[in-house]
Image (cartoon, rainbow, N blue to C red):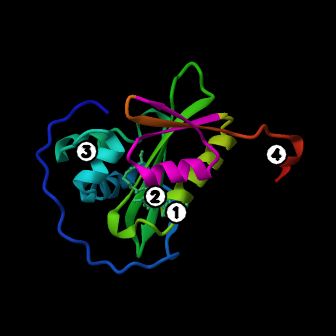
C-alpha cells in the first residue's frame, strides 16, 4: 500500500450491460495474471484509492498484479459475460502466525451494487476457514461505506484508527459435525 505517484489514464466508459445475478465466481490461476491486470487497470481513480489507500498509477498496478499470485495468496475472480470484472484476494498476514489473513477486493464500477463484493468476501471467508485461518481482516478507508457495509454483514468487529476501519471477522470454531458438511 506504499505511496505511488499517479500517472494514470482513465479507462473509457464500459458499455457492457448490467446483468444482475448473472456472474460466476471461481479461483483464478497464475496463467490468468493478464486478465487480473486488465481488471485492475479498468478501476477508476476513486476505486484505486479505496482499494490501495493511495492514488495507484498504472505502473504500480501492473507491479501489484505481477506479484499477486506470489506467496501463496488465493485470488478469486468474478466473471460477467466471460470478462473478469471483480477480484478478491486472501493473503496470510504473517508466515509465523498462519491463522490470520487479510482480504481485499475490487469490483468495476458498472458492476457494483449487484452483490458481487458481498459474495467474494463470503467465499474468501469460507476458503480461509477450510485452511484453518481463524481470523480474517478487512481494512478500508472510513469513507468506504460499501466495504464497511459488507464487512458488517459478514459479522466483522469494527475498529477505527487514523482514518482506516479494520474489520476483524472470526471464524466459528469447527466442530466434528461442521467438518462432515
Ligand atoms: C467495495 C466494493 C468491492 C463493493 O463491491 P460491490 O459488488 O458493489 O458490493 P455489493 O454489491 O455486494 O454491495 C455491498 C453493500 O454496500 C452497499 N453500498 C454500495 N455502495 C454504497 C455506497 N456508496 N454507500 C453506502 N452503501 C453502499 C450496498 O447497498 C450493499 O449493502 P447491503 O448488503 O446492506 O445491501 C466496490 O465498491 C469496490 O470495488 N470499491 C473499490 C475498491 C474497494 O473499496 N475495496 C475494498 C477495500 S479492500
User: Which of 50/1 is in front?
Assistant: 50
- Contact flag, marks 2 and 1 (Cβ < 8 Å): yes
Which quadrant, please, contains the C terminus?
A: bottom right
- In this rendering, the count of numbered labels is 4
Say which residue appears at 51% left-offset and 68% top-offset. Answer: 24
Could you say which disc has been placed on residue 179 in the image? 4
Query: Residue 158: where, in percent of width, then height?
Result: 56, 37
Q: Which residue is tagged 2?
A: 77
Of callouts 4 and 3, which one flags the residue occurring earlier in the amino acid sequence?
3
In this view, 76 is above or below 21: above
Q: Identify the residue at the far right of this view.
A: 177
Q: Is residue 44 magenta?
A: no
Q: Is residue 176 left or right of residue 158?
A: right
**What distance separates the C-alpha of mark 3 from that of mark 2?**
17 Å
As helix, strand or loop, the secondary structure at mark 4 comes to: helix
**What distance separates the C-alpha of mark 4 from that of mark 3?**
38 Å
Q: Which residue is tagged 1?
A: 25
Could you say which disc has been placed on residue 132 in the image? none
Query: Residue 79: where, in percent of width, then height?
Result: 44, 67
Q: Which residue is tagged 3?
A: 61
Amino acid at each position: 500500500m506504499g505511496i505511488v505517484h499517479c500517472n494514470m489514464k482513465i479507462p473509457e466508459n464500459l458499455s457492457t450491460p448490467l446483468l444482475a445475478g448473472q456472474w460466476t465466481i471461481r479461483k483464478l490461476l497464475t496463467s490468468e495474471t493478464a486478465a487480473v491486470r486488465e481488471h485492475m487497470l479498468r478501476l477508476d481513480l476513486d476505486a484505486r484509492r479505496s482499494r490501495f489507500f493511495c492514488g495507484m498509477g498504472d505502473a504500480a498496478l501492473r507491479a501489484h498484479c505481477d506479484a499477486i499470485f506470489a506467496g501463496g495468496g488465493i485470488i478469486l475472480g468474478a466473471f460477467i459475460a466471460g470478462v473478469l470484472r471483480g477480484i478478491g484476494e486472501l493473503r496470510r498476514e504473517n508466515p509465523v502466525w498462519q491463522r490470520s489473513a487479510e482480504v481485499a477486493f475490487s469490483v468495476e464500477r458498472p458492476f457494483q451494487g449487484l452483490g458481487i463484493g458481498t459474495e467474494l468476501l463470503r467465499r474468501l471467508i469460507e476458503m480461509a476457514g477450510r485452511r484453518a485461518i481463524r481470523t480474517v481482516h478487512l481494512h478500508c478507508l472510513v469513507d468506504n461505506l460499501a466495504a464497511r457495509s459488507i464487512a458488517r454483514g459478514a459479522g466483522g468487529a469494527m475498529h477505527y484508527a487514523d482514518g482506516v476501519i479494520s474489520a476483524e471477522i472470526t471464524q466459528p470454531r469447527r466442530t466434528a459435525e461442521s467438518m462432515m458438511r
